[in-house]
Image (tube, grey):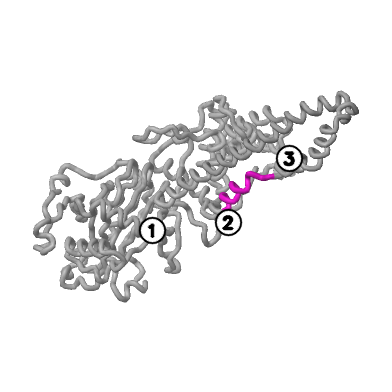
Amino acid sequence: MEKFLFFIPWILLCCCWTTHAEVFTSIGQMTDLIYTEKELVQSLREYIKAEESKLAAVKSWASKLDALTRVSTSDPEGYLAHPVNAYKLMKRLNTEWSELESLVLQNPSDGFIANMSVHRQYFPDEEDQTGAAKALMRLQDTYQLDSEAFSKGKLPGVHSNTVLTVDDCFDMGKTAYNDADYYHAVLWFQQSLKQLDDGEEAVVSKADILDYLSYSVYQMGDLPRAVVLTRRLVAIDPNHDRAGGNLRYFERLLSKQLTEMNQADQPATEEPIQLGTYSRPKDHLPERESYEALCRGEGVQMTVARQSRLFCRYQDGDRNPRLLLKPMKEEDEWDNPHIVRYLEMLSDEEIEKIKELAKPRLARATVRDPQTGVLTTANYRVSKSAWLEGEEDVIIERVNQRIEDITGLTVETAELLQVANYGVGGQYEPHFDFSRRPFDSNLKVDGNRLATFLNYMSDVQAGGATVFPDFGAAIWPRKGTAVFWYNLFRSGEGDYRTRHAACPVLVGSKWVSNKWIHERGQEFRRPCGLTEVD
């Protein structure tokens, strides 16, 4: 029966999965929250001013009446012998005290509460907060940042005074813990404990942190450390509900483990838990390590021999009239498969107009479920997107035409221009742009996604590269430029080397727009090859 004392110290936070709730994955939309918060602060200051004014009036009344009652109570009969005093007493009790009562009953908070109510519908919910916490953990993994670096605001190439408190770190740990993600829970509970040990003040108690940390460490299979942490918990709080039972359970398991391994009891290391102390659990993505290494700029397979085959040139679209006077500047980014970058593809004016049209429509980006074929949201694609038609604005039509002129491919059968904004930890894990499900409805009319034309509409301070794990390429965002590659061979077979990813944005806001060009209409523009891989 003893083991029933050993239960998870969860404080479950309810997530309301409503139809309107979406993770705030777009910096473009989150900027509105900044101004909302500023307005609420101003409203709060007005409330404070009103409360102070009310309190000053009440204090004035109290001071005046205090002096008056000292005189009246010293000789009540003598005081009332004066007819004016008798009249004023009647007046005060009948009228002035009622006015004071009305003043006290006034609620200056009404305006502030009303303002809060108006804006509350736009506030992030529990799901959004959880999503933001998981985004930080995603960045932590991808860019190999320890919890202390995050808590002190030390990000690559960024100087900031933004810090995470003990309570912030504890809440991060609880988010992971509630998701049974003990790997990240350990890292954040450890950081919370470290900052508390260093003397930082907090709402959460050391006992609570140790309670969660010791169990998380146990779940990671580190029994010696779990025993040490639980002993520390018992020393702090001998009457803790679970600590005693947990400690006996851990000690018994450890003793059994040492006996089976024929080892003597070894004291647990005093080294603090940090990134690398425990192995990160494997997940669904086979190329996780190579993908994340490329995001960090590591493992790029750009050899001297390959670089010697890369050139830059002026592209006039096979003497297209619209490009003769001002041809596009084209640079090779990769030789095979061939990926090119076009410089000065979009002007600042065009970028701002596209963002302006897209912002009101940004919604959580979707992917096609491989089992059902239905579009749905997924954790491996975290961004917000909108689709823009050429008829909506002359600039969209102009961009579509420019893509056709440059590539020589018709955009009549292409998809609408998709605009995406990646916010905190925004990413799109390795995927293919072409479809491998031939019964998809879009394939029956326009064919598969032949090529991808990707516009970068912002610079990114850190992170946000487009990477190709299969052949080790990393392409970094440069505002106003675009990259282009074919997803299919001339035979119509998919080029599986083009599996690519949008790395998480570490610092900054990443805006892109892309055009997926389909097969139909390209029969004479890109004729079939004689072999499968032409």
Q: Which residue is drawn at 41% across and 33% down?
A: 160
Q: Horizontal placement of 157 versus 397: left or right? A: right
Q: Residue at x 56, y 27 (%)?
A: 200
Label 1 crowding class (10 Å Cα cut-off): few <14, some 14-19, many 20+?
A: many
- Chain-order first, disc 1 or disc 3: 3
Marks 1/3: CA distance? 57 Å
Q: Which amino acid does label 3 sit on?
A: Leu
Say which mark, if any, is on residue 16: 2
Q: Residue at x 55, y 60 (%)?
A: 18
Location of the C terminus (image quadrant): bottom left
* In this rendering, the label closer to the viewer, 2 or 3: 3
Q: Indicate whether residue 17 is drawn in magenta.
A: no
Q: Horizontal placement of 249 versus 454: left or right? A: right
Location of the N terminus (image quadrant): top right
- Chain-order first, disc 2 or disc 3: 2
Query: Which of the 4 image quarters holds residue 16?
Result: bottom right
Q: Can residue 488 be seen in this view?
A: no
Residue found at the far front of this picture: 83
> Quick check: marks 2 and 3 in contact, CB under 8 Å?
no
Instruction: Report the residue marked by disc 1.
Output: 385
Instruction: Report the residue marked by disc 3.
Output: 100
**Residue in front for this viewpoint, 413 or 230:** 413
Q: Residue at x 51, y 29 (%)?
A: 272
Label 1 secondary element: strand
Residue found at the far bottom of this picture: 445
Residue 466 position in % (x across, y down): 30, 50
Marks 2/1: CA distance? 23 Å
